[in-house]
Image (spheres, rainbow, N blue to C red):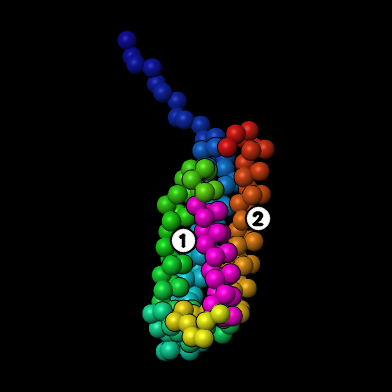
């Protein structure tokens, strides 16, 4: 008796639950954005005063506006890699994106506080960078909330 022939598996349409749904997709997009900012900060020409970039203190400016340094670039890389590492599970992806958003809030408010209260700071802060960090907080947190809501609507659970 011959063994039954197995039919090839049909390729099904993408199942959002298998790919992690909108939350995981959003987390990966944020990771790409954060990593892109880090890479751009390390490119001479895109970053003005590149030769004056220091480890902490720096006169280098991404796009000529946003103060950056080796530490800032390193932290951006760590944020991006952390988001990618946890983007496989919707709950973990959501948590790490929210924590990164809160870190941007702390950077924006902390930078503003340093500019007002410190006569000298060794951290690369300026008004544009503070506003960028606050804008990233709002955008990232708002997107995390919206994609979590969409995830629940599509899949019924979170």
Dot 2: what SS? helix
Residue 109, percent across and down? Answer: 58, 69
Toward the viewer: 1 or 20?
A: 20
Residue 155, compared with residue 36, is above or below; it is: above
The answer to whether one can see residue 43 in this image is no
How many residues crowd mark 1 within 10 Å: few (<14), some (14–19), many (20+)?
Answer: many
Closer to us: 107 or 14: 107
Q: Rate crowding at label 2 as few (under 14), some (14 to 19) or many (20 or more) other CA atoms within 10 Å.
A: some
Quarter of the figure with the N terminus: top left
Image quarter in which the C terminus is found: top right
Label 2 sits on residue: 142
155 in relation to 138, above or below: above
Question: Left or right of 49: which side holds 3?
Answer: left
The residue indicated by pointer 1 is: 80
Q: Is residue 120 among what the camera can see? A: yes
Question: Residue 25, image x and y in percent?
Answer: 55, 50
Q: Are marks 1 and 2 in contact (CB under 8 Å)?
A: no
The range drawn in magenta is: 96-116
Q: CA distance from mark 1 to mark 2?
A: 18 Å
Q: Position of residue 85 (x, y in %)?
A: 42, 52
């Amino acid at each position: 008796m011959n063994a039954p022939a197995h039919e090839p598996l049909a390729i099904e349409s993408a199942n959002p639950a298998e790919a992690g749904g909108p939350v995981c997709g959003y987390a990966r997009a944020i990771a790409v954005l954060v990593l892109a900012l880090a890479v751009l900060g390390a490119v001479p020409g895109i970053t003005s005063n590149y030769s004056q970039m220091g480890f902490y203190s720096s006169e280098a400016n991404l796009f000529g506006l946003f103060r950056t340094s080796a530490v800032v670039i390193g932290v951006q890389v760590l944020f991006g890699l952390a988001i990618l590492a946890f983007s496989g599970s919707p709950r973990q992806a959501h948590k790490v994106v929210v924590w990164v958003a809160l870190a941007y809030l702390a950077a924006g408010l902390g930078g503003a506080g340093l500019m007002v209260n410190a006569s000298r700071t060794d951290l690369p802060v300026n008004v544009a960078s503070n506003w960028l960090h606050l804008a990233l907080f709002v955008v990232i947190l708002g997107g995390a909330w919206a994609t979590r809501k969409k995830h629940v609507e599509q899949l019924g659970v979170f």
